[in-house]
Image (cartoon, grey):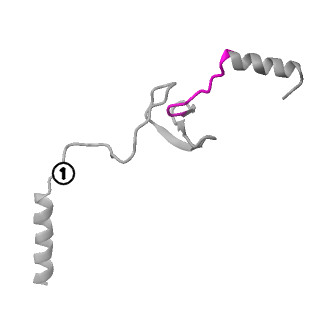
Amino acid sequence: MTFLISISLWLVEGLLKYQPSTEQNPPTSLPVFTCPSCGSHHTIKNGYIHNGKSKLHCEECGQPFVINPTNKTRYPDTKQLIDQLLLELIS
């Protein structure tokens, strides 16, 4: 019986000495992404696009988005060539 009392006193003393830190740091392992349309930080992963980039989904506005999207633009010369080939019915 005295053994249980001594253990419980030891635990109480340890709890009284414990002082939780007042700093609230976010976890460093998870990056925080903001929604481009509403600016909210409440986003969740929503799969991947065709080239392997992560899709995200905003929980506030429901907008899906991609971090650092790359848009492939066609040069005017290439567009002209495509138009000429389409007119000649060559794919």
Badge 1, how many Cα within 10 Å: few under 14, some, many 20+? few
Residue at image position (60%, 40%) is 51
Q: Amino acid at mark 1?
A: Pro
Q: Secondary structure at mark 1?
A: loop
- Choose top left, top right, bottom left or bottom right for residue 81: top right
Determine whether 57 is above or below 6 in the image. Answer: above
Q: Going by the image, does 90 lie left or right of 24?
A: right
Determine whether 82 is above or below 60 in the image. Answer: above
- Choose top left, top right, bottom left or bottom right for residue 24: top left
Residue 35 place in picture, x, y as percent? 48, 30
The boundaries of the magenta stretch are 66-76
In the image, farthest residue toward the bottom: 1
Q: Going by the image, does 6 lie left or right of 37?
A: left
Image quarter where the N terminus lies is bottom left
- Choose top left, top right, bottom left or bottom right for residue 41: top left
Disc 1 marks which residue?
Answer: 20
Instruction: Name the one closer to the observer, 26 or 84.
Output: 84
Assign the magenta stretch its main secondary structure: loop
Residue 61 place in picture, x, y as percent? 54, 30
Image quarter where the C terminus lies is top right
